Image: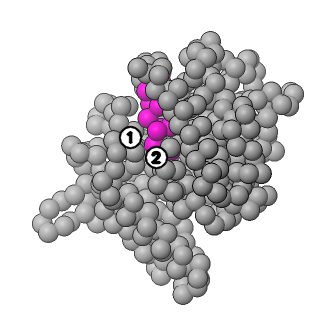
């Protein structure tokens, strides 16, 4: 891969293949070279190869993931692994990648209300499809939603859901190290701060993170601004209270004006509000209609119930606003 100037987390480049130049970008993840030969190291490589195959295969238009064309094992030299992704069709060496997080709050890049709702629906559909094929994303937040930009022309209609460093099949234990603390505010409270107090991640945790993403898209402001988190990006005890404050389960919230969740009813309407609120509640009748204890136990019945609720109460509700 021939390197180009680009952000360190997602470097751009050109992959030379049989005399053809392919515009690509690379997504790195940290890995411990000290685990070489261990069961954990083998499981990591198998998981990485499996995800690469999933992201390389033909997929529905709703699945907003980039096309993977390979992966790199660089543990011996730099203790890291990487996926190689094809840039969007029509990209040139001047095409830049921008994250949703970097665009939020910028008036010049704020889409219309209908475009924002359509974006929310596309991202919810992509999370649903990822769950359908048996994968958890584990890092759903606005820094992992990316767009291509040529000059100042932003392709808001063509987002990618990226950030697969922690993604894995829907089995096994919660990732316990390496998560960037800046994005802890988007995680379920009990798996924040790299000290998870539950045994495994769940689809409802991805759905909760999606709810915060829907909140940001509607207001076109990043979560730390909506919540008035003065210490962000430094970790804070406030991070684990975001859900309770939004759902009005705790008093003395930090936001200065009205609750940004209830404010959705005025700005984008009841359907969007209730879809977002269900994501944040996650469990029980007001959430995804699975209880928190049952969600921890894997079963086809529970999985079907969760899939149906997420599809009908969130994805289809958002679609009905778009259409």
Q: Choose top left, top right, bottom left or bottom right for residue 251.
A: top right
Q: Which badge, 2 or 1, is on the more N-terminal residue? A: 1
Residue shown at 51%/57% (left/top)? 134
Look at the image and say whether residue 118 sits in the magenta stretch. Answer: yes
Residue shown at 54%/53% (left/top)? 137
Look at the image and say whether residue 13 sits in the magenta stretch. Answer: no
* Residue situated in front as seen by the camera: 225 or 288: 288
Q: Which residues are magenta?
A: 116-127
Residue shown at 31%/30% (left/top)? 153
Q: Secondary structure at mark 1?
A: loop
Rendered-image quadrant of the N terminus: bottom left
**Residue receiving disc 2:** 129
Residue 76 location (% of width, % of height) = 47, 81
For disc 1, the neighbor class at 10 Å (few under 14, some 14 to 19, many from 20) is some
- Circle number at residue 112: none
**Residue receiving disc 1:** 62
Residue 291 location (% of width, % of height) = 75, 44
Above or below, 155 against 135 in this view is above
Report if residue 294 is visible in the image: yes
Residue 111 location (% of width, % of height) = 43, 22
Q: Choose top left, top right, bottom left or bottom right for residue 274.
A: top right
The tally of labels here is 2
């Amino acid at each position: 891969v021939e390197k180009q100037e680009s952000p360190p987390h997602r470097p751009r480049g050109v992959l030379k293949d049989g005399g053809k130049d392919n515009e690509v970008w690379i997504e790195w993840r940290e890995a411990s070279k000290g685990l070489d030969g261990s069961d954990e190291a083998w499981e990591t490589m198998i998981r990485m190869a499996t995800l690469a195959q999933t992201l390389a295969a033909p997929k529905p238009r709703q699945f907003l993931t980039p096309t993977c064309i390979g992966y790199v094992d660089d543990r011996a030299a730099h203790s890291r692994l990487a996926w190689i992704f094809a840039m969007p069709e029509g990209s040139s060496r001047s095409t830049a990648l921008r994250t949703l997080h970097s665009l939020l709050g910028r008036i010049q890049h704020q889409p219309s209300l209908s475009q924002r709702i359509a974006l929310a629906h596309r991202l919810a559909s992509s999370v649903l499809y990822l769950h359908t094929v048996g994968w958890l994303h584990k890092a759903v937040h606005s820094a992992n939603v990316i767009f291509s930009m040529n000059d100042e022309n932003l392709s808001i209609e063509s987002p990618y859901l990226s950030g697969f460093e922690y993604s894995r099949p829907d089995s096994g234990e919660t990732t316990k190290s390496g998560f960037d603390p800046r994005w802890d505010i988007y995680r379920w409270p009990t798996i924040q701060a790299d000290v998870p107090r539950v045994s495994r991640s769940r689809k409802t945790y991805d759905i909760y993170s999606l709810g915060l993403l829907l909140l940001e898209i509607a207001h076109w402001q990043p979560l730390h601004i909506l919540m008035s988190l003065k210490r962000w990006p430094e970790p804070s005890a406030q991070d684990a209270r975001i859900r309770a404050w939004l759902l009005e389960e705790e008093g003395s919230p930090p936001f200065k004006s009205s609750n940004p969740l209830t404010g959705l009813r005025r700005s984008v309407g009841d359907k969007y509000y209730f879809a977002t609120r269900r994501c944040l509640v996650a469990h029980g009748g007001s959430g995804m209609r699975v209880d928190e204890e049952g969600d921890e136990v894997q079963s086809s019945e529970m999985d079907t119930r969760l899939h149906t609720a997420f599809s009908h109460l969130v994805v289809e509700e958002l679609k009905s606003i778009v259409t």
